Image (tube, helix red, strand yellow):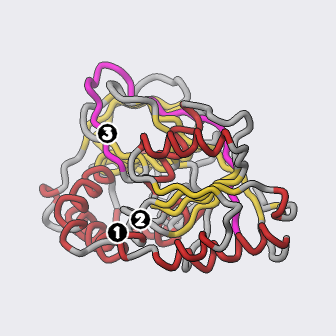
Amino acid sequence: MSPAILESGPKHRIGILTNPLSGTNRKGMEALSQTISKYPQAFHKNVQTPRDISDALSDFARHKVDLIVISGGDGTVQAVLTVLFNNEPFITQPQLLVLEAGTTNMIAGDVGVLGNQNKALRRLLQWAQSGSGRVTKIQRPVLRLQVPGHEVKYGMFFGAAAISQGIQYYHKNLHNKGLRGFPGICLTLARYLWATIGKHRQSTTTTGIEYGLNRQALQKENFLLLFVSTLERLFFGLRPFWGPGKGPLRFTAVRSSAKYLLRVLPSLARGRRAARGTPENGYYSDNVEEVKLFLDSPVALDGEIYTPETKHEPTLLQCGGTVTFLRL
């Protein structure tokens, strides 16, 4: 959907959520705090836990906030979406503006504002005070994820198999050792790519998953990669979606025995069809309404890991609704 120019800022009541534990904010929030202090009309909350976010959003709803700024990572955005849809504190869903303040910033890179978050916030608040500047809005569907044994979650990027393995590896071996952000992500991706195409495939565990799309008959495969997203592009600008369907959920999977990986993946990662990138060779992509998975290995939603209590109940992905995001 093409962005639309938003009406002038003074009509909006703004709430700002800052997570001091998010990647960029760990280095200090002095400049951001100073900018916020110059706009006392905005409601501001520091949040670290889902409970903090729930309490903050309830307070924003009481003050009739209709535009929420999120200074946090993908996990913070996921927690906000989960509260908005599970608890429904607002009569009308507020619009969201996501700043680049996390580790991967995949959501901000697609539907938010990249670059210096303090400068972006100043531009937004200037627009809110005077109406000067240009703000656009886009609408995106949101994933609804139901994992056996867990509260229903809402987010924008789901991953299983090597995706969740890579996230676990990153948090365990790199994140707490100073390799945060893109350097750590690059090393993790390089490790799993090398394990896939090199002579170390045994270091990457493939995942047996029974799956079904759009309530069709279940199939079972050993997958190397499997992910579902409502984003149009992922980190590094990748667009690994080439399926023909019209559903709101973008589904992509690569079988562990997929052929011609070196030849096919570069094209498919950019959303380009490849002659050999077919289901017969182990590559799957479609735009669907529902994804049903039966597995007992960990899965990830926007960087947060969840392990199903049982593989006898489905891990279910559906469209949970639509959110309006703002861009500067």
Residue ID for mark 3: 306
| Left or right relative to 152: residue 112 | right
- Which of discs 3 and 1 lies nearer the camera? The answer is 3
Rendered view: 290 above or below 299: above
Q: Identify the residue at image location x=62%, y=34%.
A: 89
Q: Of marks 3 and 1, which one's residue comes earlier in the chain?
A: 1
Name the outermost residue toward the top: 312
Residue 69 numbered tag: none
Q: Which residues are magenta?
A: 304-328
- Residue drawn at (38%, 24%) of the image: 314
Residue 138 in the image: x percent, y percent?
73, 56
Q: Which mark is residue 262?
A: 1
How far, Cα to Cα, is label 2 from label 1?
6 Å
**Which residue is at 55% across, 29% downward?**
214
Residues at marks 2 and 1 touching, judged by CB atoms closer than 8 Å = yes
Please say if 112 is above or below 47. below
In this view of the protein, can residue 65 be seen by the observer? Answer: yes
Badge 1 element: helix
- Of callouts 2 and 3, the N-terminal one: 2
Most frequent secondary structure within the magenta stretch? strand
Nearest the viewer among 153 and 310 is 153
Q: Residue at x 53, y 74 (%)?
A: 32
* Image quadrant containing the N terminus: bottom right
| The quarter of the displayed image where residue 97 is located | bottom right
Marking on residue 265: 2
Crowd class of label 3 (few under 14; some 14 to 19; many from 20; radius 10 Å):
some
The residue type indicated by label 3 comes to Tyr
